[in-house]
Image (tube, rainbow, N blue to C red):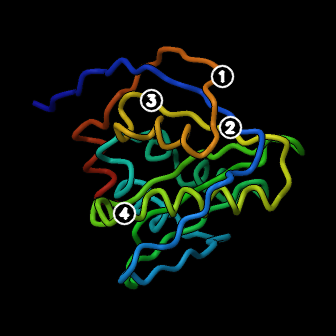
Amino acid sequence: MVKTPSSIKVHITRLEMTAPPKTSLAVPVNIQTAIMRAPDIPLPFYRHLYRQVGARWHWVDRIRLSDEDLATALHDQRNNISVLYVNGAPAGFFEYFRQDEETIELSHFGLMEHALGLGIGKWFLLQALYAIWTLNPQRIVTTTNNLDHPRALQLYQMFGFSPTSTGEGIVRPLSDKELLELAKKG
């Protein structure tokens, strides 16, 4: 018998930032880093990044998309994905979406488990924000919830985001069947 996971209630915080960060941070020492844009990211690589970064935080939305719907979302000209490499291996990514001329959404940001604890998270978020601000938006928006990293909200606020609203939501974790299908896709 296949067990269906229980839905999880989440508290969602929406945030916005209306000025570039005033902070600068050096990359942690003894770590080789590169951040590369991935304009035509292959779907299996994106799914790998998304699962490696988001599995522990219950990221499921993009996993449930069909290949066609995921390709449409990822390859939209308003969407941008950049991958962080640490010591030659993928270590995280950020993704943003230009909603209109004034607003850009930081839709995904995170590190893979092997990159956690290296002191690189703050630096990487700052690089993501610098990249977005080069497009001269009026504001950057993002969301976080209580299933994300315990310091996510604090980190966003440290760099200049302010909460604009809160709400409740439901996350339905991946079922065993969905995990099996995901494994088959590679």
| Residue 152 point in image, percent of width and height | 44, 40
The residue indicated by pointer 2 is 141
From this viewpoint, which residue is outermost toward the left? 1
In three-dimensional space, the C-alpha distance between marks 2 and 3, rounded to whole angstroms, equals 14 Å
| Residue type for callout 3 | Asn
In three-dimensional space, the C-alpha distance between marks 2 and 1, rounded to whole angstroms, equals 9 Å
Q: Residues within 10 Å of mark 2 (few under 14, many from 20)?
A: many
Between residue 16 and residue 53, name the one nearer to us.
Answer: 16
| Residue type for callout 2 | Val
The residue indicated by pointer 1 is 164
The residue indicated by pointer 4 is 119
Going from N to C along the chain, the mark reached first, 4 or 3, is 4
| Residue 95 point in image, percent of width and height | 60, 55
From this viewpoint, which residue is outermost toward the right? 101
| Residue type for callout 4 | Gly
Where on the picture, by quarter, is residue 24?
Answer: bottom right
